[in-house]
Amino acid sequence: MNTTRRTLLALSVSGLALAACAGTTVATLASDVQLVDSGAGSLASAVMQLAGVPAATITQIQGYLAIIDTGAAAIAATGTTGATTIVQQIVAALKALVPVVMPLIPGGSPLEPVANALLSLVPALLAYIGISGASAAVPVYTPDQARLILRAAMK
Protein backbone atom coordinates (compact mmCIF):
# COMPACT_ATOMS: atom_id res chain seq x y z
CA MET A 1 0.00 0.00 0.00
CA ASN A 2 2.83 2.44 0.82
CA THR A 3 4.49 1.78 -2.52
CA THR A 4 1.29 2.70 -4.31
CA ARG A 5 0.94 5.90 -2.29
CA ARG A 6 4.54 6.85 -2.99
CA THR A 7 4.11 6.15 -6.66
CA LEU A 8 0.95 8.23 -6.82
CA LEU A 9 2.60 11.07 -4.90
CA ALA A 10 5.62 11.05 -7.20
CA LEU A 11 3.41 11.10 -10.28
CA SER A 12 1.25 13.87 -8.85
CA VAL A 13 4.24 16.05 -7.99
CA SER A 14 5.80 15.44 -11.41
CA GLY A 15 2.51 16.26 -13.10
CA LEU A 16 2.22 19.50 -11.15
CA ALA A 17 5.76 20.47 -12.06
CA LEU A 18 5.09 19.84 -15.74
CA ALA A 19 1.79 21.70 -15.60
CA ALA A 20 3.62 24.68 -14.13
CA CYS A 21 6.06 24.59 -17.05
CA ALA A 22 3.40 24.23 -19.72
CA GLY A 23 3.48 27.96 -20.51
CA THR A 24 7.21 28.07 -21.12
CA THR A 25 8.11 30.41 -23.97
CA VAL A 26 11.26 30.94 -25.99
CA ALA A 27 12.02 33.96 -23.80
CA THR A 28 11.55 31.87 -20.64
CA LEU A 29 13.82 29.16 -22.00
CA ALA A 30 16.50 31.70 -22.88
CA SER A 31 16.17 33.36 -19.48
CA ASP A 32 16.30 30.04 -17.62
CA VAL A 33 19.33 28.90 -19.58
CA GLN A 34 21.08 32.21 -18.82
CA LEU A 35 20.24 31.81 -15.10
CA VAL A 36 21.59 28.26 -15.15
CA ASP A 37 24.75 29.44 -16.90
CA SER A 38 25.32 32.27 -14.41
CA GLY A 39 24.35 30.17 -11.38
CA ALA A 40 26.56 27.26 -12.39
CA GLY A 41 29.43 29.66 -13.03
CA SER A 42 29.03 31.32 -9.63
CA LEU A 43 28.73 27.98 -7.86
CA ALA A 44 31.73 26.47 -9.62
CA SER A 45 33.86 29.58 -9.12
CA ALA A 46 33.18 29.57 -5.37
CA VAL A 47 33.85 25.83 -5.06
CA MET A 48 37.09 26.02 -7.05
CA GLN A 49 38.37 28.65 -4.60
CA LEU A 50 37.88 26.35 -1.60
CA ALA A 51 41.05 24.96 -0.08
CA GLY A 52 41.94 21.40 -0.96
CA VAL A 53 39.96 20.96 -4.17
CA PRO A 54 42.02 18.59 -6.34
CA ALA A 55 43.24 19.85 -9.70
CA ALA A 56 41.47 16.96 -11.47
CA THR A 57 38.16 18.02 -9.90
CA ILE A 58 38.70 21.62 -11.00
CA THR A 59 39.37 20.41 -14.54
CA GLN A 60 36.19 18.31 -14.42
CA ILE A 61 34.13 21.27 -13.16
CA GLN A 62 35.58 23.51 -15.89
CA GLY A 63 34.60 20.94 -18.52
CA TYR A 64 30.97 20.92 -17.35
CA LEU A 65 30.94 24.74 -17.27
CA ALA A 66 32.23 24.87 -20.84
CA ILE A 67 29.30 22.71 -21.98
CA ILE A 68 26.81 24.92 -20.13
CA ASP A 69 28.43 28.15 -21.42
CA THR A 70 28.44 26.91 -25.01
CA GLY A 71 24.81 25.81 -24.76
CA ALA A 72 23.70 29.08 -23.21
CA ALA A 73 25.46 31.06 -25.94
CA ALA A 74 23.82 28.91 -28.63
CA ILE A 75 20.33 29.37 -27.15
CA ALA A 76 20.93 33.13 -26.87
CA ALA A 77 22.09 33.29 -30.49
CA THR A 78 19.62 30.96 -32.19
CA GLY A 79 16.58 30.70 -29.91
CA THR A 80 14.86 27.38 -30.44
CA THR A 81 16.92 26.23 -33.41
CA GLY A 82 18.49 22.99 -32.21
CA ALA A 83 17.18 23.62 -28.69
CA THR A 84 16.39 19.96 -27.98
CA THR A 85 19.98 18.80 -28.28
CA ILE A 86 21.40 21.90 -26.60
CA VAL A 87 19.04 21.69 -23.62
CA GLN A 88 19.80 17.98 -23.24
CA GLN A 89 23.53 18.78 -23.16
CA ILE A 90 23.02 21.54 -20.58
CA VAL A 91 20.88 19.26 -18.40
CA ALA A 92 23.43 16.44 -18.63
CA ALA A 93 26.22 18.83 -17.64
CA LEU A 94 24.17 20.16 -14.69
CA LYS A 95 23.34 16.66 -13.51
CA ALA A 96 27.04 15.82 -13.63
CA LEU A 97 28.29 19.11 -12.13
CA VAL A 98 26.13 19.29 -9.02
CA PRO A 99 27.11 15.87 -7.60
CA VAL A 100 30.78 16.79 -8.08
CA VAL A 101 30.51 20.11 -6.21
CA MET A 102 28.00 19.19 -3.47
CA PRO A 103 30.45 17.15 -1.34
CA LEU A 104 32.91 20.04 -1.49
CA ILE A 105 30.40 22.62 -0.19
CA PRO A 106 30.60 23.22 3.57
CA GLY A 107 27.37 22.41 5.42
CA GLY A 108 25.02 25.36 5.80
CA SER A 109 26.79 27.26 3.04
CA PRO A 110 24.74 29.62 0.86
CA LEU A 111 26.05 27.57 -2.07
CA GLU A 112 23.75 24.64 -1.20
CA PRO A 113 20.54 26.42 -2.26
CA VAL A 114 22.22 27.50 -5.50
CA ALA A 115 23.13 23.90 -6.33
CA ASN A 116 19.61 22.73 -5.50
CA ALA A 117 18.09 25.59 -7.51
CA LEU A 118 20.11 24.54 -10.56
CA LEU A 119 18.73 21.02 -10.37
CA SER A 120 15.23 22.33 -9.63
CA LEU A 121 15.15 24.04 -13.04
CA VAL A 122 15.92 20.78 -14.87
CA PRO A 123 12.24 19.72 -15.18
CA ALA A 124 11.33 23.15 -16.57
CA LEU A 125 14.11 22.95 -19.16
CA LEU A 126 13.14 19.42 -20.14
CA ALA A 127 9.43 20.31 -20.32
CA TYR A 128 10.25 23.04 -22.83
CA ILE A 129 11.70 20.46 -25.22
CA GLY A 130 8.86 18.02 -24.54
CA ILE A 131 10.64 15.58 -22.26
CA SER A 132 8.78 14.50 -19.14
CA GLY A 133 10.65 14.96 -15.89
CA ALA A 134 8.79 12.04 -14.29
CA SER A 135 11.97 9.96 -14.06
CA ALA A 136 13.92 12.80 -12.48
CA ALA A 137 14.18 13.36 -8.75
CA VAL A 138 11.53 15.62 -7.28
CA PRO A 139 12.98 19.15 -7.28
CA VAL A 140 13.72 20.91 -4.00
CA TYR A 141 12.29 24.19 -5.31
CA THR A 142 9.58 25.23 -7.73
CA PRO A 143 10.86 26.80 -10.95
CA ASP A 144 9.92 30.27 -9.66
CA GLN A 145 11.74 29.70 -6.36
CA ALA A 146 14.79 28.37 -8.21
CA ARG A 147 14.83 31.44 -10.46
CA LEU A 148 14.72 33.77 -7.43
CA ILE A 149 17.60 31.92 -5.76
CA LEU A 150 19.71 32.01 -8.92
CA ARG A 151 18.99 35.70 -9.51
CA ALA A 152 20.03 36.45 -5.92
CA ALA A 153 23.24 34.46 -6.40
CA MET A 154 24.14 36.67 -9.38
CA LYS A 155 24.23 39.82 -7.22
Image: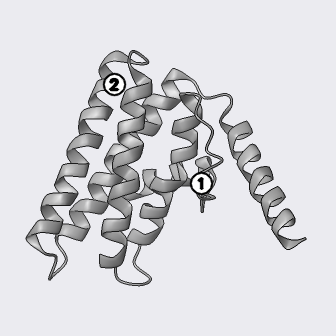
Is residue 155 among the parts visible in the rendering?
no
Above or below, 5 relative to 104 = above
Q: Residue at x 61, y 47 (%)?
A: 144
Residue in front for this viewpoint, 154 or 128: 128
Counting other residues with Cα less than 10 Å from the Cα at mark 1, is it few (<14), some (14-19), or many (20 or more)? Answer: some
Q: Residue at x 86, y 63 (%)?
A: 4
State the quadrant of the C terminus: bottom left
| Residue farthest toward the left in the current orientation of the protein | 55
Q: Secondary structure at mark 2?
A: helix
Q: What colouring does the structure picture have?
A: one colour
Q: Going by the image, does 30 lie left or right of 67?
A: right
Residue beneath label 1, please?
145
Q: Residue at x 44, y 56 (%)?
A: 152
Residue beneath label 2, please?
76
Is residue 120 among the parts visible in the rendering?
yes
Return the x and y of residue 30 as percentages of the image width and height.
Answer: 43, 29
Q: Across the whole image, how many numbered discs are drawn on residues?
A: 2
Q: In the rendered structure, which disc, 1 or 2, sits on the residue that comes first in sequence?
A: 2
Above or below, 52 relative to 1 = below
Q: Secondary structure at mark 1?
A: helix
Return the x and y of residue 34 as percentages of the image width and height.
Answer: 37, 38
Q: Amino acid at mark 1?
A: Gln
Above or below, 43 relative to 107 = above
Label 1 – label 2 distance at C-alpha: 23 Å
Q: Are marks 1 and 2 in contact (CB under 8 Å)?
A: no
* Displayed quadrant of residue 108: bottom left
| Residue farthest toward the right in the current orientation of the protein | 1
Return the x and y of residue 55 as percentages of the image width and height.
Answer: 9, 69
* Displayed quadrant of residue 15: top right
Q: Amino acid at mark 2?
A: Ala
Counting other residues with Cα less than 10 Å from the Cα at mark 2, is it few (<14), some (14-19), or many (20 or more)? Answer: some
Return the x and y of residue 98 as percentages of the image width and height.
Answer: 37, 62
